[in-house]
Image (tube, grey):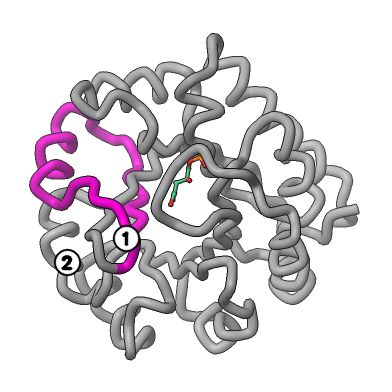
Amino acid sequence: MAAPCGGKKCRIGPSILNSDLSELASECQRMMDSGADYLHLDVMDGQFVPNLTFGHPVVKCLRPKLPGVFFDMHMMVQKPEQWIQNMADAGANQYTFHYEATDDPTTCIRKIREAGMKVGVGIKPKTAVDVLLPLVDLVDMVLIMTVEPGFGGQKFMADMMPKISFLREKYTDLEIEVDGGVSPSTIQHCADAGATMIVSGSAVVNSENPKETITYMRDIVNQAIQKTPA
Ligand SMILES: O=C(CO)[C@H](O)[C@H](O)COP(=O)(O)O
């Protein structure tokens, strides 16, 4: 049984990484029309991860096409401090940086707040969850990666679930996001561990019925939340 989640509700944030990036705005809209709660936008710099996507100029173009949509920027970039103000100006709502990418996570958190965005901090699979403990009270969300960051469509690492359970036991109200290989066949692991924010890329984007896929995963997580003691 999952640990208590502070009465939270599950939110599903599709990752558009594996969608048709030449049609980015319409792919984002398709996800929202399919019932997504927010969008998880993957920014890659070719240094922190061996892949490139897009930066704040693209976010700035997306913003007016998707008014009111919550943009969770997954910043897979080295020195995440350098893009905070640009992303805020472009209309990002949350700036999720990687613990491994900065020498000074606390200052990074402060700068994100000062720029008016919510704060997320993530860890890669090989990083111990304990590093997050001094930061949890300073952030809005923690991200547990269940693949090595860089590419969509990878295999879900179920052995990351103890990191989520560990945090959930300690922090009832914490938003815990899970990202990488999350699909209808792996969602139960995330739900049982206590994740509340679910990133799913290829499983949703490539689904014949994305609305059904999103609803199915959200229901599984909400059922796990409801089963927990108040
Ligand atoms: O951060 C990511 C990769 O680094 C992506 O968000 C993630 O992998 C989503 O894609 P999929 O659900 O296909 O694994």
Give me the C-alpha separation between circle 1 and circle 2: 9 Å
- Report the disc number at residue 222: none
Determine which quarter of the picture holds residue 97.
Answer: bottom left
Quarter of the image containing the C terminus? bottom right
Apparent side of residue 223 relative to residue 127 in the rendered image (left or right): right
Residue 201 in the figure: left or right of residue 95: right
Q: Residue at x 36, y 55 (%)?
A: 74
Magenta stretch encompasses residue 56? yes
The stretch drawn in magenta includes residue 100:
no
Q: Is residue 121 above or below residue 208?
A: below
Q: Quadrant of residue 188?
A: top right
**What residue sits right under mark 1 in the picture?**
75
Q: Position of residue 167 (x, y in %)?
A: 70, 71
Write the start and end of the magenta stretch as one range: 48-75
Q: Which residue position is annotated with label 2?
A: 83
Image-quadrant location for residue 105: bottom left
Residue 107: % across, % down = 30, 87
